Image (cartoon, helix red, strand yellow):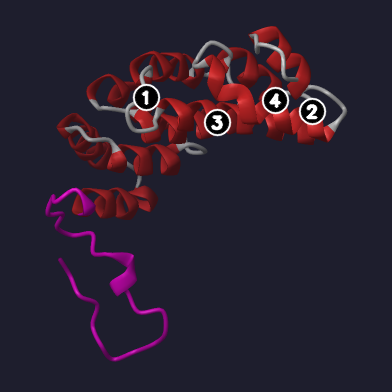
Amino acid sequence: MNDPLTVAALLAAIQSDDENVRTQAWLRAGELGPAPLKQLAQVMAGGKLEVSRAAQRAMWRIVHVVGAPGATGRDETCAALRELLHDDQPVAVRREVAWMISELSQGEQDVEPIAALLKQENLREDARMVLERLPSENAVAALKTAFESAPDDFKHALAQSLRRRGVQVAGYPSQKLKPTKATRVKPVVG
């Protein structure tokens, strides 16, 4: 696969039965920028395990190349990734894409689509952690909003993210400070 790389050639190589061909393909995926992300997500969602992994690795390779110091294309890549957060994508794809966005995002435009994932029980923990990482005050606001309406089993996690972003949260102490064995020491509140 030393020929000029095209999206079609990448997809064919990613789906090859030969593990060496798949590896060379995902290693070169960054050359194409965000163009193959949607098709790679489709391959990741279906197919054999190793083919799915190769597609996932290719997507991450694109993210790493675009996110390198001095590289261009962050905004275009984040826009392509945001398109993969919709409910028509499997949970595994949306989870990976959320984390990919957390590696590239410069802030505001990514907050709302990630915050929407907080309402989905199988993605809320990932969304919370991604919002914690986004360099945006709107991400903090989204965490605060989610905290207000979150079920009790998720409030401690949201409180932890808010504390990490410098927000004081009363009534939901860190679970790390909660005793795991019977003790006469009272839990620290605050």
Tell which of 22 and 116 is nearer to you: 22
Type of amino acid at the residue the image marks with label 1: Ala
State which quadrant residue 184 falls in.
bottom left
Please say if the residues under marks 2 and 4 sit with CB atoms less than 8 Å apart.
yes
- Report whether 73 appears left or right of 132: right
- Counting residues from the start of the chain, the first of labels 4 and 3 encountered is 4
Tell which of 122 and 47 is nearer to you: 47
Q: Residue at x 39, y 13 (%)?
A: 76
- Read off the magenta span: 164-190
Magenta highlight on residue 183: yes
Q: CA distance from mark 2 to mark 1?
A: 26 Å
Q: Which residue is mark 2?
A: 21
Residue 123: image x %, image y %? 48, 36
Q: Which residue is mark 4?
A: 25
Residue 71: image x %, image y %? 37, 24
Q: Which residue is mark 1?
A: 71
In the image, residue 9 sits, relative to residue 67, either above or below, namely: above
- Counting residues from the start of the chain, the first of labels 3 and 2 encountered is 2
Type of amino acid at the residue the image marks with label 3: Arg
Please say if the residues under marks 4 and 1 sit with CB atoms less than 8 Å apart.
no
Q: Which residue is mark 3?
A: 61
Visible residue check, residue 52: no
Helix, strand or loop status at disc 3: helix
Q: CA distance from mark 2 to mark 4?
A: 6 Å
Q: Residue at x 31, y 50 (%)?
A: 155
Helix, strand or loop status at disc 2: helix
- Counting residues from the start of the chain, the first of labels 4 and 1 encountered is 4
Helix, strand or loop status at disc 4: helix
Please say if the residues under marks 1 and 3 sit with CB atoms less than 8 Å apart.
no
Visible residue check, residue 93: yes
